Amino acid sequence: MNFAFVFYIKLSIMEQKYEKCDCGQKANWMYAPSSDSTENPFYCDACVPRGCSCNSYHTDPNAYHPPLENPELPEGIENQDWHWKNKEKTEWCYLDEQFREYPCVEYWYDEEGYEIENN
């Protein structure tokens, strides 16, 4: 393979431009339903909002409509794999590998980041 071609490919990859979070870091999260063109829909892993109710589970079967026969109970190690969201211990959620709650399911994740689209 031609050295100049390989160098060009590596340089092209290094020069790729990525969307940025408001804090200036490369964005790995995008708020998918964003429609306000003045709002930045891109977030880095540190700034993405976390703790949405869509990732919560309830131990009370009557918290769901229709009521569940058997509520989903947490598995794994408390405060490592999951944690309680209230003192009553009726609501819980899973945690990521850094022991944080997950963002809402409306945030899409891309490990490589979101490349800037030139329209």
Image: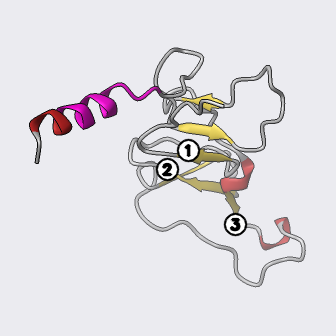
Q: Are marks 1 and 2 in contact (CB under 8 Å)?
A: yes
Colouring mode (rainbow / by chain / secondary structure / one colour): secondary structure
For the stretch drawn in magenta, the main secondary structure is: helix
Residue 94 position within the rendered picture, expressed as x and y whole percent measured from the top left: 54, 55
Task: Give the residue drawn at x 76%, y 23%.
Answer: 39
3 or 1: mark nearer the eye: 1
Q: Dot 2: few (<14), some (14–19), or many (≥20) neighbours within 10 Å?
A: some
Q: Amino acid at mark 1?
A: Glu
Q: Secondary structure at mark 2?
A: loop
Lateral position of residue 83 relative to residue 106, left or right: left
Residue at left 66%, top 31%? 119
For marks 1 and 2 on the same chain, the one whose residue lies earlier in the sequence:
2
- Assess whether residue 18 is covered by the magenta stretch: no
Q: Report the residue marked by disc 2.
A: 95
Q: Are marks 3 and 1 in contact (CB under 8 Å)?
A: no
Residue type at mark 3: give it: Thr
The residue that disc 3 covers is 59
Q: Is residue 102 visible?
A: no
Label 3 environment density (alpha carbons within 10 Å; few <14, some 14–19, many ≥20): some
Q: Residue at x 56, y 26 (%)?
A: 47
**At which x and y percent is residue 86?**
68, 46
Q: CA distance from mark 1 to mark 2?
A: 5 Å
Instruction: Say which amino acid is labelled 2.
Output: Leu
Instruction: Please name the residue shown 62% across and 55% down the image.
Output: 92
Q: Is residue 48 left or right of residue 10?
A: right
Residue at the farthest bottom position: 69
Q: CA distance from mark 3 to mark 1?
A: 18 Å
What mark, if any, has residue 101 been given in the picture? 1
